[in-house]
Amino acid sequence: MKLPLKTSTAGKRDFFGIDKTMTLIIFLLLIFGSVMVFSASAPYAKSTYGDGYYFVKRQIFWVIIGVLGMSVCAAMPLSFHKKYTAPIGFSIALLCLVLVLLSGASVKRWLNLGFFSFQPSELMKPMLILILALYMEKVQPYIRKNGISGRRRGKISDKKQFLRSSLYGTFIPVLIVAFVCVLIMLENHFSGTIITFAIGAAVIFAGGAMLRWFAGAGAIMAGIVFTVLFGTDYASERIDIWLHPENFSVRDETWQITQGLIAIGFGGIFGRGLGNGLQKQLYVSAAHNDFIFSIVCEELGLIGATAVIILFGAFVKRGLKIASEADTLFGSLTAVGITVHVGLQAFLNIGVVTGTIPNTGVTLPFFSYGGSALVVLLCEMGILLSVSKKEAPDY
């Protein structure tokens, strides 16, 4: 994918110049997800709260707030996100990550502000994308003048330029990502650390980091992250459950994944029909959350599951197209990061539900029930649509 190198944009911008195909994909995912939240949550909501509409009413409320946030973010010029959203948003997200570790809460993932709670790691993902995109654009002169001879590939012709390019183009951004990952890792947030590391690496790589240093720094960072994560009881137990489920109780440790696989198996090709799933009747834990894809498979079958995968595939394809056609490098890298974020998270969730990878607790974007996480996701989509905006014609 060829990314633009120009760093300024001229021309009048129009809110309705946003990419219509991406907008349609986003709303299809959102509507599909909201319908499945209602279907998957009704039995649990009825049993626990005496109201089968308990979760869907709240989901609709957050969808409305999120769509408003998405509209505002999409209406703002990309220059606003570059000048204000990136530095201010990243600073706030970083502060929240520190505060949640100092909160004294038993589960150090949620920050309670009194009137609502949210996970700072969810806010950090898009803010990290923005700050890295801003940084990589700023240091492009150093990256392009990398001190490597064009005549003999790989030969260093200017040692000073090579070291400067390595420092600014690879090591500093990798340290930023590493610092953020360590903070999230201290929360025992396995999936959040993996996703944050991956989207950070994607932005750095797309920004032109030298492959030799990028691969080396990435390997070291990945080694540290995985060593620490897999060295904890929390993560190692999940891996053991995935590799050796026969050693664990089907009524305890493997209950969720087992019931999820049963739901997938019952779905067949055409499914039981929307609303007719049996495994959501308090068998699949968190049926409206992490394992909602298993309910999609049971009620809508292989056809419904394929539709979900196609929608996410279309999102990734269109997102990369927006990145390749963006006016600025900042916009390109922002689109790359957001696209990788949504695509990777969907891949991990579906992998967990189908038993392909260990249970990481990651949610399915647009589908899993959530409040603040959904609002942040939709605002992130607004930023992506802001990147996609075309110049409005002058009349």
Image (cartoon, grey):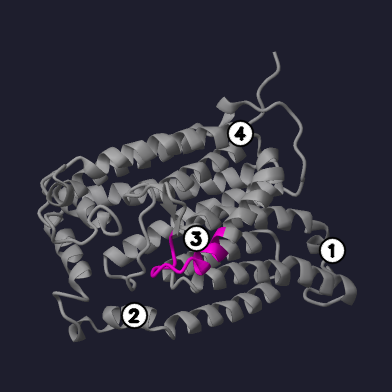
Q: Are marks 2 and 3 in contact (CB under 8 Å)?
A: no
Q: Earlier in the sequence, mark 4 or mark 2?
A: 2
**x and y percentages locating residue 387 in the rendered image:** 61, 40
Distance from Cα at disc 4 to Cα at disc 2: 43 Å
The residue beneath circle 4 is 389
- Asked if residue 230 shows in the view, the reply is yes
Q: Could you tell me which secondary element the residue under label 2 belongs to?
A: helix
Whether residues under marks 4 and 2 lie with C-beta atoms below 8 angstroms apart, the answer is no
**Which of marks 4 and 1 precedes in the sequence?**
1
Q: Quadrant of residue 268?
A: bottom left
Give the mark, 2 or 1, whose residue is nearer the N terminus.
Answer: 1
What is the distance, in whole Å, between disc 2 and disc 1 at their CAs?
Answer: 44 Å
Callout 4 crowding tier (Cα within 10 Å): few <14, some 14–19, many ≥20: many
Question: Which residue is denoted by mark 2 in the rendering?
Answer: 239
| Residue 101 forms part of the magenta stretch | yes
For numbered disc 4, what is the local secondary structure? loop
Circles 1, 4 touching at the beta carbon (< 8 Å): no
Q: Disc 1 marks which residue?
A: 145
Closer to the eye: label 3 or 1: 3
- Can you give x and y, in whole percent of width and height, for residue 238 in the image? 32, 78
The residues colored magenta run 96-110
Quadrant of res 14:
top right
Callout 3 crowding tier (Cα within 10 Å): few <14, some 14–19, many ≥20: many
Seen in the picture, residue 40 relative to 106 is either above or below; the reply is above
Q: Nearer the viewer, mark 4 or mark 3?
A: 3
Work out which quarter of the rendered image holds the C terminus and state it.
Answer: top right
Q: Residue at x 82, y 62 (%)?
A: 142
Q: Nearer the viewer, residue 64 or 243?
A: 64
Q: Which residue is mark 3?
A: 121
* Type of amino acid at the residue the image marks with label 1: Lys
Residue name at image x 21 percent, y 62 percent = 285
